[in-house]
Amino acid sequence: MTSEFTDKNTLMPQPTLIIYTGGTIGMEKNAQGIYTATAGFEALAKRTIAASIWAQMPAHDYLEIKPAIDSADMTPMIWQQLADLIIEKYADYDSFIILHGTDTMAYSASMLSFLLGGIDKPVILTGAQIPLIEPCSDGATNLLVALQLAANYKIPEVCIYFANTLFRGNRASKISTSAMIAFESANYPMLAAFENQIKCFPNRCLPAETPTFLATTDKQRIKSLHLDKLQIAVIYLTPAMPCELIHAMIDAHVNGLVLVSYGSGNVGSHNTPLIQALQTAHEHGIVTVNVSQCSGGHVSHQYAAAQPLIRAGVVNGEDMTIEAAVTKLYYLSAVYGRDSHKIKEKCQQNLRGELTPPQSNC
């Protein structure tokens, strides 16, 4: 494999830490023949991965989050647990791989990109569409290439590797329930690709920074965020959607809303009940971020149908994915509490490569 982006310390390389959370890659059948998340991934991998593949695996250690979960059971508390674990082990390893179910992988990658801002080492999430125990599993290849990327390339950000492609984590979304090409990044190009050899694109990666979060005070800051106490809701716009849904969210005192609107951010210029509901949310200090139902392109407020959103205090989410918008609101709400002005200000900024600044959208 070629190494055109290898400025890692080659004198005393440290192993990669593989953190297993569960997901399809490690599932086995129970007594009823149903695939379930199971513990003991290291033993499973040694039992099922061919010796020829093992021989290519860079040095690594295993660590498991217990209990192993289906990623549909992912929670903000586990996001925080993963961030805490990486910070705790940061000095001991050159890179990190998180084995994760595909359903919420993009959410976890996005959340970790905000929690681990300023890292100078790779954190790569990967998994499988087919369990490792099955002969046609994609898990072994995904794990091997993710390990090669993590061990040999200095990519200082949180990524997703799947089906021969390395994505920026907060730009990726799951697009298929069963196809091997399960993820896409419609608004940002791949960071690396694997076709017989690895090809990296370092100019697309975030710049390496001094990892300021390693200070004790920052460790405590992340532990004090209490993500599990927050509520972020998603409102997916449909024709004649009952606005009582938004009022119910207001009554529930949610911390933020993500509005998934039509096309380039439109809600209709005559949808008065919706605009009034969003205005009420704004008056209650609830920040609403507007993103598109389309995977490609960005939100624009140039159309008449989007103007009422501006007047209602809705934030333009530009080209963020739904996953990035949700987790960004989680993160900012944890940091700034109910300071809606600060949250709105930061929502519109490109914090970890999750959005394209407006002047770049022309």
Image (spheres, grey):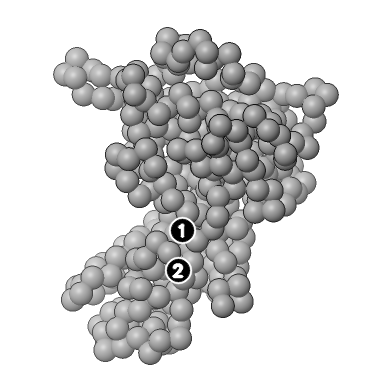
- Would you say 24 lies left or right of 218 here? left
Can you identify the residue that label 2 sits on?
297
Residue 336, visible in the rendered structure: yes
Q: Are marks 1 and 2 in contact (CB under 8 Å)?
A: yes
Give the answer, above or below, for where 267 lies relative to 257. Answer: below
**Above or below: residue 176 compared with residue 332:** above
Distance from the alpha carbon under mark 1 to that under mark 2: 8 Å
Rendering coords of residue 199 (x, y %): 63, 40
Q: Quadrant of the N terminus?
A: top right
Question: Hey, what amino acid is under mark 1?
Answer: Ala
Residue 261, located in which quarter of the rendered image?
Answer: bottom left
At 58% from the left and 28% from the top, the residue drawn is 147
Residue drawn at the location 60% of the way across and 72% of the way down: 360
The residue that appears at 43% across and 64% down in the rendered structure is: 296
**Does dot 2 land on a helix, a strand or a loop?**
loop
Q: Residues within 10 Å of mark 1 (few under 14, many from 20)?
A: some
Q: Which mark is residue 186?
A: 1
> Dividing the picture into quarters, in which one does residue 86 lie?
top right
Q: Is residue 118 something one can see in this rendering?
A: no
Give x and y (percent) for residue 345.
58, 72
> Residue 46 location in percent, x, y?
47, 11
Q: Which residue is drawn at 72% across and 24% down?
A: 14
Instruction: Locate residue 87 relative to residue 21 in the image: left or right.
Output: right
